[in-house]
Image (cartoon, grey):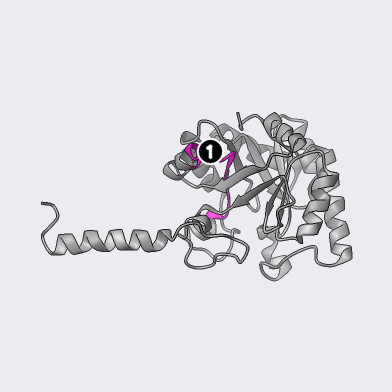
Amino acid sequence: MSKNLGAWEKAKREGRKMTMITAYDYPFAKLADEAGLDAVLVGDSLGMVVAGEADTLRVSLEQMEYHTRIVAAGVKRALVMADLPFGSFEESPAQAFAASARLLKAGADIVKLEGGAPMVETVAYLSARAIPVCAHIGLTPQHVRQFGGFKRQGKTPEAAARLIEDAVALAEAGARIVLMEAIPSDLATEITQRLSVPTIGIGAGNGTDGQVLVLHDVLGLNTDRAPGFAKRYLDGAALMQTALGQYADEVRAVRFPA
């Protein structure tokens, strides 16, 4: 069962790649689970791809609870990961625990938090209190104002060294998975080889233990701001627009209802 984090650790030891996709509601979560994805991420990316906002910063813990609950209802087999939204965990480890407990009670199997060295203490605190944690490093969207935009990270030797140190420290603190976003592929591969815990990449090459993409990018539903590293497997927007247009045409022509 993919819900068992031990299965992820076993997959890493055996060299089997793991798969993850975002989902924000019951029907898409059910489809992802039935398609055989190993994990479903209830991402705070919902602020952008569902709510149409410019970034993830306005997503609330209440929103994350709601979407986690309806996603978990559609998943029987896959691991359910939920993001801790901006402002819900940075103040103190105790604050992070309270927010994480709410997401686990809503149906998450593991929570994800963004940040490197400053989050080591928090990861250790959560791990000691029965909260499985995925650490997110590299391009961390909640830091977009600090970065000055959605910019690739770890490009200089100094920045790469910091990311390696962060990844090692977070894993040693108890992170069960480390997710790396928008960093050079050779750096992501090196980090993956150094860690005993599984790694997941997004825009980080194919040397990680698993991959994650945003559902709306994969299905071609994100017509606004799909990142360059995403791959579209379906022109979903065009298919849906065609179907909706046909419905409208039939109503206007009095062909539906028959």
Place of residue 112 in the rendered image (x, y in percent of width and height, measured from the top left): 67, 44
* Magenta highlight range: 32-46
Place of residue 191 in the rendered image (x, y in percent of width and height, measured from the top left): 82, 50
Q: Is residue 2 above or below residue 89?
A: above
- Looking at the image, which residue is at 75% across and 60% down? 183
> Callout 1: 10 Å neighbours few (<14), some, many (20+)?
few
Q: Is residue 206 left or right of residue 27?
A: right
- Looking at the image, which residue is at 15% across and 64% down? 252
Q: Is residue 119 above or below residue 159?
A: above
Place of residue 122 in the rendered image (x, y in percent of width and height, measured from the top left): 77, 42
Viewer-proximal residue among 253 and 84:
253
Is residue 34 rendered magenta in the image?
yes
- Looking at the image, which residue is at 56% across and 60% down? 231
Residue assigned mark 1: 36
Viewer-proximal residue among 87 and 77:
77
Q: Quadrant of residue 132?
A: top right
